[in-house]
Amino acid sequence: MGYRGSGVGLITRTLLLAICGEREVTIEDTENDQQRLTHNMAQQIVHKPLTFGSLFAGIGGFDLGFERAGMECRWQVEIEPYCQRNLAERWPNVGQWDDVRTFPPNPVEDWEVDVICGGFPCQDISNAGSKLGLSGDRSGLWFEYARILRVLRPSFVVVENSAALLHRGIGDVLRDLAGSGFDAAWEVLSACAFGAAHMRRRLFIVAYANGLDGRPRVRNPLAQQDRSIQAIDGSPSARADWQARLENPSALYRGADGLPFGRERNHAIGNAVVPPVAEWIGRRLISVL
């Protein structure tokens, strides 16, 4: 927010005082009062946290990480009942919606935020999935994601998906972002690099509105060779093993489906963004503003 002209008008000063919690102004206010008001408002703006909304929120991995970084969650969109219950319990004062296909409801201005984040479904992109890419029913929900960006026009977007998106749809995603007015940079990040006990290589795309400054904030991973997780962990049969386990839910969840909500819990954890990774990205976003 900026100010034009040499002084702050009476009506504007009244609004500033109301926002800053000061007394009501009168026509006798001095130039020093005007300077004090402007300073107070500037301080208010500096300390105001970035707001974000979470698509495909799951159990809130992105949300927890961004909150740890100092951002404020305004809304979450999630369709799975188990995840919805978890979100409602942990974020009781945050707006909830159940389907990206009908989001946002009117008035859309109520859902505007600084940042929109979300990992759209990877089942058709992952090497362990159908490999249909964005033409699949699940991963094709990316196009709803892109529609929401065009409606709400955030300043930043953070997209998460399987690293396989690099060769199974990233061109379409970047084209949609560019067509919606965003530049983007991307990188593959591993959970183990942030202290987790597992590798979990995931692609993160950070997009920013063209009018910000046009400079990428994250290094482009296409400048380096991309190796499959099988080559890294020395397990050539890992992909076949996961595909076989998908045929048997009890094997996939190692019997957890015998416990109350065990299968749903494991499924939600498996789809979640690792919070320390989201926190690192959130802190980077805040640091460049």
Image (cartoon, rainbow, N blue to C red):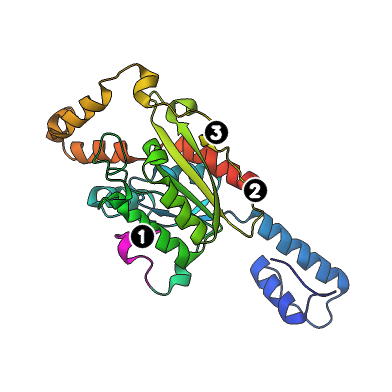
Question: Residue 223: which disc?
Answer: 3
Residue at 25% over, 36% down = 266
| Whether label 1 touches label 2, CB < 8 Å | no
Residue at 29% over, 34% down = 127
Along the line of sight, which residue is nearer the eye, 140 or 225? 225
Q: Which residue is mark 2?
A: 215
> What span is in magenta?
94-105
State the image quarter where residue 20 is shown: bottom right
Of the numbered discs 2 and 3, the one sitting upstream in the chain is: 2
In three-dimensional space, the C-alpha distance between marks 2 and 3, rounded to whole angstroms, equals: 17 Å
Report if residue 142 is visible in the image: yes
Q: Mark 3 or mark 1: which is in front?
A: 3
Q: Residues within 10 Å of mark 3 (few under 14, many from 20)?
A: few
Q: Amino acid at mark 1?
A: Glu
Of the numbered discs 1 and 2, the one sitting upstream in the chain is: 1
Q: Can residue 12 be found in the magenta stretch?
A: no
Q: Mark 2 or mark 3: which is in front?
A: 3
Residue at 20% over, 31% down = 243
Of the numbered discs 3 and 1, the one sitting upstream in the chain is: 1
Q: Which residue is mark 1?
A: 144
Quadrant of the snapshot with the N terminus: bottom right
Above or below, 227 relative to 119: above
Residue 153 location in percent, x, y? 51, 64
Residue 82 location in percent, x, y? 24, 48
Residue 6 location in percent, x, y? 85, 74
Along the line of sight, which residue is nearer the eye, 9 or 134? 134
Above or below, 267 relative to 49: above
Residue at 71% over, 64% down = 41
Above or below, 114 relative to 245: below
In three-dimensional space, the C-alpha distance between marks 1 and 2, rounded to whole angstroms, equals: 26 Å
